[in-house]
Amino acid sequence: GAPPPPGPYGAPPPGPYGPPPPQGYPPPHGYPPLPNGRHIGRVKSFNPKHGFGFIDCPQSRPHYGRDVFIHKAQIGDLEVGQEVTFHIEANRDGHPQARDILKMDGRPPGPVPKHLMELMQKGAGGGKGNRDRDRDGDEGKGRRRRGGKGRKKQPQTDGKGNPVEADEDTSGPQANGDQASS
């Protein structure tokens, strides 16, 4: 007999339901699925003066018991409240730190906005941001000389840990020892 005529909707798709989408099925809340090891979180706080902030990540909280640390080197143009994906790496203390942070569209954060950059440089005195400081020559010889004077007031010791008077000749006890033995 002849095959049955196609139904009102045309021929059925090949296979049971057609091939699955290449990246698998998205999770119910509409984001693409996370590659292995990536977490989703929301930037909870960022303190430009201290140069770091935290990401609220419900997924990692049971494991670490705390928010995920985000360093200023990774914050870029992210804003508090923004959702991001990231890898977690434990720091020396075993606390979670965000690495390889991406926005929800898969792009890395953009450059830090200028106003934030300025705040980040004002805080954390020193660091890479404050290069203009050595242009005034502050860090030059003057500072070292002052430091030298201050240091003499602390008790100095010879190699054996015996105190040595600052105004005496610092070759100290050996010289005195020679006089005593003569």
Image: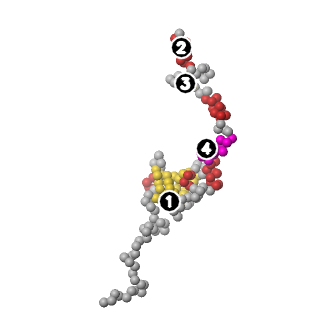
**Residue 104: horizontal and vertical position, in percent?**
52, 63
Using the rendered image of the protein, determine whether residue 55 is visible from the camera's viewpoint. yes
> Of residues 135 and 93, which is closer to you in this image?
135
Main secondary structure along the magenta-highlighted residues: helix
Rounded to the nearest whole Å, what is the CA distance between mark 4 and mark 2?
A: 49 Å
* Residue bounds of the magenta highlight: 123-136
Compared to residue 177, the image places residue 143 above or below, namely below
Q: Earlier in the sequence, mark 3 or mark 4?
A: 4
Label 1 environment density (alpha carbons within 10 Å; few <14, some 14–19, many ≥20): many
Label 2 environment density (alpha carbons within 10 Å; few <14, some 14–19, many ≥20): few
Q: Amino acid at mark 3?
A: Thr
Specify the farthest residue to the right: 136
Q: Are marks 1 and 3 in contact (CB under 8 Å)?
A: no
Q: Amino acid at mark 1?
A: Thr
Rounded to the nearest whole Å, what is the CA distance between mark 1 and mark 3?
A: 56 Å
Rounded to the nearest whole Å, what is the CA distance between mark 4 and mark 1?
A: 31 Å
Q: Secondary structure at mark 4?
A: loop
Q: Earlier in the sequence, mark 1 or mark 2?
A: 1
Q: Amino acid at mark 2?
A: Asp
- The label shown at residue 85 is 1
Rounded to the nearest whole Å, what is the CA distance between mark 2 and mark 3?
A: 19 Å
> Of residues 39 and 146, which is closer to you in this image?
146
- The label shown at residue 178 is 2
